[in-house]
Amino acid sequence: MNKEKLLDLYRMMVQIREFENECIELAKSNATRAAVHTYIGEEAIAAGVCAHMSNQDYITSTHRGHGHCIAKGADLEKMFAELLGREGGYCKGKGGSMHIADLATGNLGANGIVGGGIPLAVGAALGIQLDNKKNFVVSFFGDGAANEGSFHEALNMASIWSLPVIFVCENNEYGISTHVSKSTNIQNIAIRAMSYGIKGVVVDGNNILEVYEETRKAVDDVVSGQGPVLLEMKTYRMSGHYFGDNQNYRTKDEVNQWKEKDPILRCEQILQKEYDLTEEDLLTIRKNIRTEVLAASEKAKLQPEPMIEDLTGDLFDQKFADIEWKSFVKAQGKG
Amino acid sequence: MKKEIIMPKVGLDMEEGMITSWLKKVGDHVTAGESLMEIETDKAVTEIEAAVTGTLVEIVVPEGETVEIATIVAWVETDE
C-alpha cells in the first residue's frame, strides 16, 4: 500500500477515535442525555472496509455505529448535533446516537435493534441486483447479532440469490456484558458461512492492512456476482458497553492486553517502521484532527434545539404512500 | 491550560454521585486513560479515568462528599 493511502486510513481511524473521546466528554456532562456506545478499539474495521465504498454503495450499521457513519463520509457537526439533540442533526435532533442515517453517503442507518440492519442490507442488495448496478452493500453487526434469527435468514436469502452484500461481523468479544464464549459454541463465527454455501473469512480486525486487503477481495467477489461473503473481524471493545459501564464482568488485565493491540497504535508502528514517519509527524496529525473534531462539537453546541411543534413531524412520508408496488418473480437458482 | 474534572453522569438515571476516593493526590501527574477517582452512585462503584494528561492541581470535592452530576470536582493543568 502506498504511503498516502495508509495515511488516509490512519487519519480516518484517528478521526473516529477523537470523535468518540469527545462523545464521552459530552456524555459525562449529560449533554447527550442518552447513552453513547463508543467504537474505541474497532476503528480499523470501519476505516478499512468503507475505504472501498462510494456514495452509491450502501451500509447498514449498529447501535455502536459512529465509526461506520464517519468512515462513510458523514459530517461531524451534523453527527454531534444529532447526539446533542439539536435541530441541525441528521435526524433533526430527534433520533440521537443510535439512529443516524445519511442517504447522501449511502448510509442506510444505525439501528438500535441488535441484528436489525442485516435483513435491510439484503433488501438493498436485491435492489442493486434488480437494477443491474455494479454497487454493493456492507452490513456491520456484532458477535451477539450473529446469534439472532435475522442473521441466519439474511445470509440464507442473500446466498440463494447471490446478492452483492458483504456481511461484516465485528466480533468484539462482548454482547453488553456477556463474553462471546458464553453465548457462542464455536471459535470462529465465519464458519457459519458454510451453512449457506458462501465464503467465510476470519480477519484480524485490529490490523488495518489486513482489513483493507480482505475487504478488497470480498468486494471483487460480490460485485462479480459470486454471491455474498461473511467477514468475521476479530477485534475488542476497548471501552465499556456504553460510557459509564463499570465493566465488572472483565478484568483490567484483559483490557490492557488488548490496548497493546490498539489498531491505531499498530498503524502508527507500521507508519514509523516502514514509511519513515516520526513520532512528531503522527502527533501533529492527531492534534490537527483533534482540533477539527472539537471545533465541530463546539459548532453543534451552538445550534438550537428542535421546536416542540415539530415533535410528530417526519413520522410519515406521503411519498412512500404513493409508491406503486410492483410484484416481481425471482428466477430460480443462482443469480 | 487548566481543565476541569466533573462528576460524570455514568448511568441513565444518575442525578448525583459520591466521591469515594481520589486515586491521585494534588501535585500528582496523570495520563489520559489513567484512573483518577472512584465514585459511587445508587447503582455501583465506578473508577473514572482522566480524559486529559497533566498535573492534578486542585481537588474541589473531597472524599465522602456527594454532588450533582456535572459539578466541578477537581482541576488538572494540562501538559499541552
Image (cartoon, coloured by chain):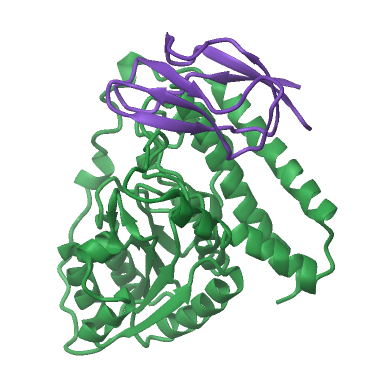
Quadrant (top left, top right, bottom left, bottom right) of the C terminus of chain A: bottom left
Q: Residue at x 56, y 66 (%)?
A: A48
**Nearest the eye: A17 or A90:** A17
Q: Is residue A214 above or below residue A153?
A: below
Q: Residue at x 71, y 65 (%)?
A: A269
User: Can residue A9 be spotted in the picture?
Assistant: no
Q: Position of residue A332 (x, y in %)?
A: 16, 88
Among the chains, which one is green?
Answer: A
Chain B's shade in the image?
purple
Q: Residue at x 48, y 19 (%)?
A: B7
**Nearest the eye: A117 or A105:** A117
Q: Position of residue A327 (x, y in %)?
A: 15, 68
Is residue A45 rendered to the left or right of residue A292? left
Q: Is residue A115 above or below residue A226?
A: above
Q: Is residue A269 above or below residue A69?
A: below
Q: Position of residue B18 (x, y in %)?
A: 40, 16
Is residue B57 rendered to the left or right of residue A85? right
Q: Residue at x 45, y 80 (%)?
A: A218
How many discs mark residues in the rendered view?
A: 0
**Nearest the eye: A74 or A36:** A36
Quadrant (top left, top right, bottom left, bottom right) of the N terminus of chain A: bottom right
User: Can residue A169 be spotted in the picture?
Assistant: yes
**Nearest the eye: B50 or B27:** B27
Is residue B50 rendered to the left or right of residue A114? right
Q: Position of residue B34 (x, y in %)?
A: 58, 38
